[in-house]
Amino acid sequence: MNTINETAPAFVEMAHRIVWASVATVDTQGRPRSRILHPIWQWDGSDLLGWVATGPTPIKRAHLQHSPYLSINYWSPSHDTCVAECQASWVDDLDTKTAIWNLFATAPALVGYDPKIVPVWTSLSAPAFGVLRLKAWRLRVFPGAVLMGQGGKVLTWQG
């Protein structure tokens, strides 16, 4: 098992390079449900937080109310993979929603984008604009080179 200080920076680098991730929640009957989302991660040297700008649909709300955990899996054609197992919560306060809107709007491409490109997100106060806060409790970083026998190191952390 690795430390968070070793694993989190490698996770953020790989996740931000891959950008899009498969995210799975669990419905009220215990069945998984996957979707593609675009998280952004912040590592401050001691704490890792993820943020997702997404529509707060009734299905997503019901799943996270039933079980506030989700799994995020990134994969690239070179077989680089990284996974974050997280506790997720909806953000309702306008100050945090504004900060996350601005975080996406000012982050370097491709992880950053202008949220206004989503037609229903006319502003950060639009009902269709939601923010999920992700607190990782487990990370795994698996470079494709390891899988292909070309060296490298798999990193795993659990808090």
Image (tube, grey):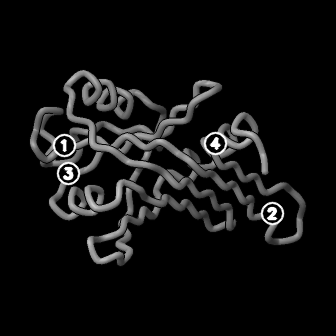
- In the rendered structure, the answer to whether residue 73 lies left or right of residue 63 reads right
Q: Earlier in the sequence, mark 1 or mark 3?
A: 3
Label 4 sits on a secondary structure element that is: helix
Give the residue type at disc 2.
Ala
Looking at the figure, which quarter contains the C terminus?
top right
Residue behind mark 4: 13
Q: Earlier in the sequence, mark 4 or mark 2?
A: 4
Residue behind mark 3: 56
Give the residue displayed 53% in from the left and 61% down from the top. Answer: 73
Q: Earlier in the sequence, mark 2 or mark 3?
A: 3
Query: How far apart in space, not on screen, are marks 2 and 3 (Cα)?
Result: 37 Å
Query: How far apart in space, not on screen, are marks 2 and 1 (Cα)?
Result: 38 Å
Above or below, 94 relative to 136: above
Q: Earlier in the sequence, mark 1 or mark 4?
A: 4
Give the residue type at disc 1.
Phe
Q: Earlier in the sequence, mark 4 or mark 3?
A: 4
State the image coordinates of residue 19 (x, y, percent, origin top left). Answer: 50, 51
Residue behind mark 1: 129
Residue behind mark 2: 145
